Amino acid sequence: MKIAIYPGSFDPITNGHLDILNRACKIFDKVIVLVADNPKKKSRFSPKERVEMIKETVDNPNVVIDSFSGLTVEYAKSNGATHLIRGLRAVTDFEYEFQLASANDFVDNNIDTVFLMSKNDKSFINSSMIMELHEAGVDVSSLVPESVNKRLK
Ligand code: COA
């Protein structure tokens, strides 16, 4: 069974993340969406809320949703995963993703990162931008799942 981890802050999950997840499910038998810590970021929603929003959105028996604070690669190893999934939206993502993939490879070179390109119409989305637009009164309901919308309201 091929297992992959899709790690991220998911603060909150967006339709862009869901697009990557759905496509990853076509490649792997099981995908674990992992709400992980990025120590450089101040969180908007708690890890528990982020997990809840994803659970309310994703209805697929091959997807597991979890949270973890520690190294993603260590989590992958202890859960039998061989790959990490990351989405690439624009050239600007490349340098950061390259560093992250290299750091993960340094920790364990048996875990490989697979990159999926975001679809054009989703490539401008990120969680901060959605929150900023929402706080400015813009309707962001077409960019996030209903579970997120509900909490934003
Ligand atoms: N569609 C829309 N937005 C997307 C997206 C997609 N397909 N993919 C990423 N994004 C956005 C996110 O919303 C996020 O936006 P924000 O910065 O405005 O909040 C941004 O792109 C990047 O977020 P994310 O993909 O969640 O990555 P991250 O940099 O926040 O998290 C971790 C990276 C959590 C996976 C990484 O830090 C990690 O593995 N941490 C655990 C510790 C560890 O193992 N460190 C590794 C070695 S240093």
Image (tube, rainbow, N blue to C red):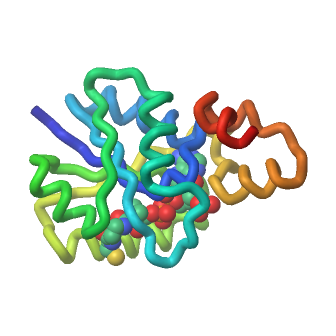
Q: Is residue 150 left or right of residue 46?
A: right
Point out the residue furthest to the right here.
Answer: 137
* Rendered residue at 35%/22% (across/down): 60
- Residue 22, image x, y percentages: 42, 29
**Res. 99 visible in picture:** yes
Q: Is residue 133 left or right of residue 63?
A: right
Location of residue 1 by image quarter: top left
Is the residue 127 above or below the residue 14 in the image? below
- Residue 110, image x, y percentages: 11, 61
- Residue 83, image x, y percentages: 22, 50
* Rendered residue at 44%/70% (across/down): 38
Q: Is residue 54 left or right of residue 110?
A: right
**Res. 91 visible in picture:** no
Is the residue 131 above or below the residue 40 in the image? above
* Rendered residue at 28%/41% (across/down): 32
- Residue 102, image x, y percentages: 30, 73
Q: Is residue 42 left or right of residue 59?
A: right
